[in-house]
Image (cartoon, grey):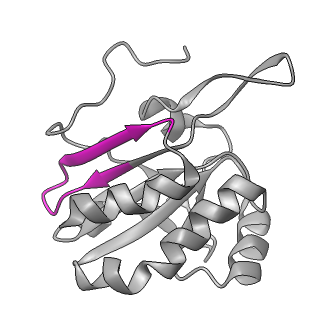
């Protein structure tokens, strides 16, 4: 269950989803057709790596917007946690709550992790860039929080 039978590949149609956002609305990937979308999965709000990644996307947001793109951050945290995290770091993009990790599983990023000698299930830090037609333009699994933004910007062109 930690990896899908066939991992998502560049060129494939990105799986659509509907998740609650920090704004209270339900957001669907298909709502963004005609725009490029950076979807990034992160383990937990307000932790060091996740803050580095989120703030990187925040700082690059003007460049991302110039490229007709948006950012969607997804973690298993709930809406209240997302709202606090977004406010604390002034994040200009939507944070989506995947509390039952259905979407993370769909994208192949819910998997076995190890920390301090313990094995557990969790989010594998990743990002996906989706083109204007809904196809995957970039797939990065186990991406570092610092490298994620530069890889995504390179893909956006």
Q: Work out whether 122 lies above or below 21.
A: above
User: Is residue 157 covered in magenta?
Assistant: no
Q: How far across and how far down the image is residue 98, in percent?
A: 61, 47
Quadrant where the C terminus is found in the figure: bottom left
> x%, y% of residue 149?
43, 62
The residue shown at (15%, 63%) is 132
Residue visible at 30% across and 54% down? Answer: 129
User: Residue at (33%, 47%) from the top-left corner?
Assistant: 16
Q: Quadrant of residue 151?
A: bottom left
Residue 67 left/right relative to 115: left
Q: Position of residue 35 (x, y in %)?
A: 22, 71
Whether residue 74 is visible, yes or no, is yes
- Residue 49 in the image: above or below residue 112: below
**Which quadrant of the figure contains the N terminus?**
top right
Between residues 100 and 119, which one lies in front from this camera angle? Answer: 119
> How many circles with numbers are drawn on the protein?
0
Residue 138: in magenta span:
yes
Q: Which residues are magenta?
A: 128-142
When asked about the image quadrant of residue 53, the answer is bottom right
Would residue 2 be found to the left or right of residue 135 on screen? Answer: right
**Residue 70 in the image: x percent, y percent?**
36, 72
Residue closest to the eye, 91 or 147? 147
Look at 33% across and 23% down and name the residue there.
7
Chief secondary structure of the magenta portion: strand
């Amino acid at each position: 269950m930690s990896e899908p039978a066939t991992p998502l590949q560049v060129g494939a149609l990105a799986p659509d989803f509907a998740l609650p956002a920090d704004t209270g609305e339900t957001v669907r990937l298909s709502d963004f057709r005609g725009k490029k979308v950076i979807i990034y999965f992160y383990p937990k709000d307000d932790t060091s790596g996740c803050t580095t990644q989120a703030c990187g996307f925040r700082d690059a947001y003007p460049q991302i917007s110039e490229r007709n793109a948006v950012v969607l951050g997804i973690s298993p945290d709930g809406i209240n946690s997302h709202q606090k995290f977004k406010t604390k770091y002034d994040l200009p993009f939507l944070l989506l709550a995947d509390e039952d990790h259905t979407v993370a599983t769909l994208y192949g990023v819910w998997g076995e992790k190890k920390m301090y000698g313990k094995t557990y299930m969790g989010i594998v830090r990743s990002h996906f860039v989706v083109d204007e037609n809904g196809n995957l333009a970039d797939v990065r699994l186990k991406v570092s929080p610092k490298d994620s933004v530069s890889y995504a910007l390179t893909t956006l062109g």
